[in-house]
């Protein structure tokens, strides 16, 4: 199979990610079917696509005629067979529950043409395990788009133990055709980007449990450093249920340290899922909460970034991604000005070790403990070595 053999794309799940992935495929010239479990949800997905296209028209990024052509290529359906019977590529964007994804992939495998590639937008979960429920594990792959897919410039491509070179090539070409930059990850919990961000999210959520700072003051401090959105508002925007499920998965697969924090447990119980339910860490009922940037917390926003450096070192040592892809991923996926290894170059590793070990003690979380390459002061040599091996 080659990229030119992809004519029709089916997107399974029309929520926050699915509708926007469908829009990406429409903008690359594909005919697209968008599936969800009921009419109201698919119709809402279509409204969200239309809303976004209208913003593109206002900004002169697309013409009225182009918009109409794109929309003519979109089919909505609640019939899975109908959605995928002509699909050359299916992209699943259903909730982050492993059993649900396995069930969907088993159905996709039965109903999609035998040549079709089956991709998952999971942020964390094993592509190998998802592929194992199909008769075509070599055609199963991860395509981890970031939110919102239509604007974010990067996609993490996840190769399972069985994904074929041909599948990787076709999907890489598809991502490039969508004007996105691909980075490549081994199949490991959280892949590159979510694994690294989860460590700093854990720190911020432990701080929330202990009421160390009001969230809006931390968000103000982050925005004063150039972030378009603070880390707590970002969690609300992504969906606290999605963050919760991710942390749960990482706690089962990587370390119990990631177990959802008590504030997260409480918010989930109250169905405060963030923007999507109107309330989360913030109240969104009257739109995006205003952050008063003139009153930031007296908190060094480099602290969570230093936690990211430590986790990035583990990701590199475990061979999950290259140093270059790790830096590219963290910059483009999370609007960081520099990647963790670019930052590490000018970081005093002895000082970093003291800081990380201090965090491990303070919160009782070994996941924060300094990696041996940092502790032994050999990080830059190891990064250089990893590049030679490639
Ligand atoms: N939200 C994010 O920022 C983000 C970023 C990257 C990746 N992801 C991943 O993308 C996936 C989707 O996340 P989301 O934020 O769009 O979630 P969402 O809750 O907004 O949307 C999920 C959609 O899947 C639908 N669904 C439920 N059961 C289904 C089934 N059996 N078949 C098909 N669709 C079904 C739901 O009705 C819903 O519309 C998850 O795996 C998530 O981890 C999310």
Image: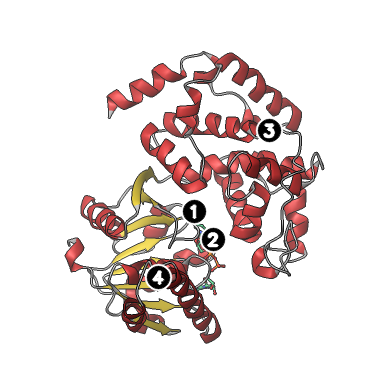
Q: Is residue 244 visible?
A: yes
Assign a secondary structure to mark 4: helix
Identify the disc placed on residue 365. 3
Q: Earlier in the sequence, mark 2 or mark 3?
A: 2
Viewer-nearest of discs 3 and 1:
1
Which residue was labeled with disc 2?
96
Identify the disc placed on residue 23. 4
Closer to us: 230 or 74: 230
Residue 60: x, y in percent? 39, 68
Identify the disc placed on residue 123. 1
Is the C-beta separation of discs 1 and 4 under 8 Å?
no
Q: Is residue 300 left or right of residue 185?
A: right
Is the C-beta separation of discs 2 and 1 under 8 Å?
yes
C-alpha gap between disc 4 and disc 2: 21 Å
Residue 297: x, y in percent? 76, 38
Closer to us: 326 or 284: 284
Is the C-beta separation of discs 4 and 2 under 8 Å?
no
Q: Quadrant of residue 145?
A: bottom left
């Amino acid at each position: 199979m080659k990229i030119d053999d992809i004519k029709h794309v089916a997107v399974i799940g029309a929520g926050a990610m699915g509708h926007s992935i469908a829009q990406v495929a429409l903008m690359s010239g594909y005919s697209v079917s968008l599936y969800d479990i009921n009419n109201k949800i698919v119709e809402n997905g279509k409204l969200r696509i239309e809303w976004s296209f209208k913003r593109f028209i206002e900004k002169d990024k697309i013409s009225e005629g182009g918009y109409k052509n794109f929309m003519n290529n979109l089919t909505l359906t609640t019939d899975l067979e109908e959605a995928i019977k002509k699909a050359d590529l299916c992209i699943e964007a259903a909730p982050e529950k492993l059993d649900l994804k396995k069930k969907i992939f088993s159905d996709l495998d039965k109903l999609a043409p035998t040549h079709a590639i089956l991709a998952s937008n999971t942020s964390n979960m094993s592509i190998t395990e998802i592929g194992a429920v199909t008769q075509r594990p070599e055609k199963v792959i991860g395509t981890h788009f970031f939110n919102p897919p239509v604007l974010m410039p990067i996609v993490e491509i996840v190769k399972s133990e069985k994904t074929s070179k041909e599948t990787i090539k076709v999907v890489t070409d598809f991502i490039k055709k969508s004007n996105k930059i691909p980075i490549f990850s081994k199949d490991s919990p959280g892949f590159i980007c979510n694994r690294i961000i989860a460590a700093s999210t854990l720190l911020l959520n432990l701080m929330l449990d202990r009421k160390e700072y009001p969230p809006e003051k931390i968000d103000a401090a982050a925005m004063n450093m150039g972030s378009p959105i603070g880390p707590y508002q970002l969690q609300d925007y992504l969906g606290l249920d999605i963050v919760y499920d991710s942390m749960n998965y990482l706690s089962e697969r990587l370390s119990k340290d990631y177990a959802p924090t008590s504030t997260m447990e409480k918010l989930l119980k109250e169905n405060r899922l963030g923007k999507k339910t109107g309330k989360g860490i913030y109240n969104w009922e009257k739109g995006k909460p205003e952050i008063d940037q003139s009153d930031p917390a007296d908190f060094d926003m480099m602290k969570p970034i230093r936690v990211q450096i430590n986790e990035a070192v583990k990701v590199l040592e475990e061979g999950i991604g290259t140093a270059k892809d790790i830096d590219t991923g963290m910059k483009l996926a999370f609007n960081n000005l520099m990647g963790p290894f670019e930052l590490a170059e000018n970081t005093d590793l002895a000082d970093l070790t003291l800081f990380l070990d201090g965090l491990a003690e303070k919160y009782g979380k070994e996941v924060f403990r300094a990696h041996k390459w940092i502790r032994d002061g050999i990080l830059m040599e190891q990064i250089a070595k990893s590049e030679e091996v490639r």
